[in-house]
Amino acid sequence: MALANCSKTYLASALCLAALLLSGCSTPSVPNEATAGSALQINADELEKQLKEFVKDDSKAKVISDSQLRKSIPEAQAWIEGLKVSPSKCGVTFAAPVTEQLAKAKMSAVEFEDRYLTVAVYQDEEALQAQWESEAKASADCARYSVTINGKTLAYHLAKQPTKTMAPFNDAYVVTSSDGSQTQQQLMVRAAQGNVMVGFQQQTTAEQTQERLQDASERIDALFAELE
């Protein structure tokens, strides 16, 4: 969902909500215990430290901590709940309560110059698996929907993209939004391994998407390797 008018941390908070809720209207594969990977045991401070190590060579990268994200999440959730989505069933994921999900995960994000990387580390594999299974039951009929906020309506189209990372579970799509006069595209990539979910978002164009998909996969793989 395009959030261009939000503050930086506000945007990252909304993206983490999306990651925690497995937002988007595509239906992901369901993980199982045999292939999901080993659980990562890490606290919020350790996660922040590892992300800072991960981006230490990028002077423009900013790590947003678990506590920073949580402080802005109530406002981000209120904003999400204020959206009018049509068909209405496509807005259920965005408006779903997140208290339970937040209690089960540590979060952090990296704000790069032109992209975002988000991380959610659940207490265990079962907690993450429950989220995937819950979303798998949701409607798959939301490839096209509209969102109205402050009297302005945007039309959205989700186009699923092929993607592969070192993680056993992957999901990627290009979200095209249009207000009738201007069109924008966002690349969204998610990957899950064990009890860790990593999300990636970047603005894109038709000409850039394949290259940016490759870049997203490489960054996600590098982050999973850092967290091992």
Image (tube, helix red, strand yellow):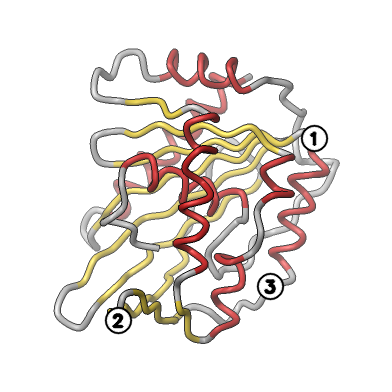
Question: What crowding class fits label 1: few (fewer than 14 Cα within 10 Å), some (14-19), or many (20 or more)?
Answer: some
The Cα–Cα distance between marks 1 and 2, rounded to whole angstroms, is: 42 Å
Q: Which residue is mark 1?
A: 124
- Indicate which label's residue lies in the foreground, 2 or 3: 2
Element carrying mark 1: loop
Left of 139 or right of it: where is 220?
left
Left of 196 or right of it: where is 91?
left
Q: Which residue is mark 3?
A: 138
The image quadrant where one finds the C terminus is: top right
Element carrying mark 3: loop
Identify the mark nearer the N-term, 1 or 3.
Answer: 1
Quadrant of res 144: bottom left
Q: Position of residue 201 (x, y in %)?
A: 38, 48
Which residue is at 76% across, 50% downward? 31
The Cα–Cα distance between marks 2 and 3, rounded to whole angstroms, is: 28 Å
For badge 2, the amino acid type reads Gly
The image quadrant where one finds the N terminus is: bottom left
Question: What crowding class fits label 3: few (fewer than 14 Cα within 10 Å), some (14-19), or many (20 or more)?
Answer: some
Q: Which residue is mark 2?
A: 151
Quadrant of res 107: top right
Identify the mark nearer the N-term, 1 or 2.
Answer: 1
For badge 1, the amino acid type reads Asp
Disc number at residue 172?
none
